[in-house]
């Protein structure tokens, strides 16, 4: 008996910003996606980052808001291709694609 193949989550960044440390990464079992962010020390801990996850047709699937140096978990992602964008203070600081297979 073979166990069913686990999902695989791949993240491809297209735009990255050197000023911010944005992390999107799966857990070891590829079941959930972690999102964490931190910015320059001068910005303080009050900075908020928004993650938007869209399906390939442009529909908003998930949205997450975190404060500086926090991490959140995105789960129940259907298999497919997604586009993500990360904003801070209405400035897009990262974007790319997310593949759940």
Image (tube, helix red, strand yellow):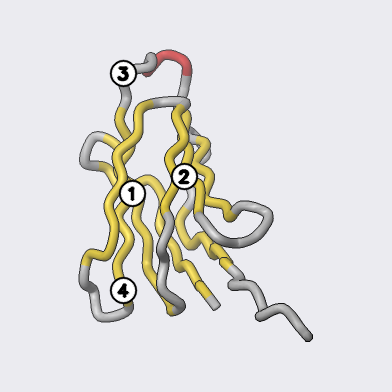
Which of these two is toward me, 95 or 67?
67
Tell me which corner region of the image, top left, top right, bottom left or bottom right, holds residue 70: top left
Horizontal placement of 63 versus 38: left or right?
Answer: left
Identify the residue at image location x=31%, y=73%.
55
Q: Disc 1 vs disc 2: Cβ atoms closer than 8 Å?
A: yes
Q: Disc 3 vs disc 1: Cβ atoms closer than 8 Å?
A: no
Residue of label 2: 35
Horizontal placement of 47 versus 59: left or right?
Answer: right
Dot 4 alpha-carbon crowd within 10 angstroms: few under 14, some 14 to 19, many 20 or more: some
Q: Earlier in the sequence, mark 4 or mark 3?
A: 3
Residue of label 1: 51
- The alpha-carbon separation of the residues under discs 3 and 2 comes to 17 Å
Image quadrant occupied by the C terminus: bottom right
- The alpha-carbon separation of the residues under discs 1 and 4 comes to 13 Å
Find residue 36 and report its horizontal and vertical position in percent. 48, 38
- The alpha-carbon separation of the residues under discs 4 and 3 comes to 30 Å
Image quadrant occupied by the N terminus: bottom right
Which of these two is toward me, 74 or 98?
74
Residue 14 - label: none
Identify the residue at image location x=65%, y=59%.
29
């Amino acid at each position: 008996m073979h166990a069913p193949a686990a999902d695989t989550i791949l993240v491809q960044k297209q735009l990255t910003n050197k000023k911010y440390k944005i992390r999107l990464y799966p857990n070891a079992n590829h079941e959930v996606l972690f999102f964490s962010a931190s910015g320059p020390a001068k910005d303080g801990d009050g900075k908020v980052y928004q993650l938007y996850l869209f399906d390939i047709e442009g529909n908003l699937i998930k949205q997450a808001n975190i404060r500086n140096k926090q991490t959140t978990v995105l789960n129940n992602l259907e298999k497919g291709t997604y586009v993500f964008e990360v904003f801070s203070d209405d400035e897009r600081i990262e974007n790319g694609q997310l593949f759940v297979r």
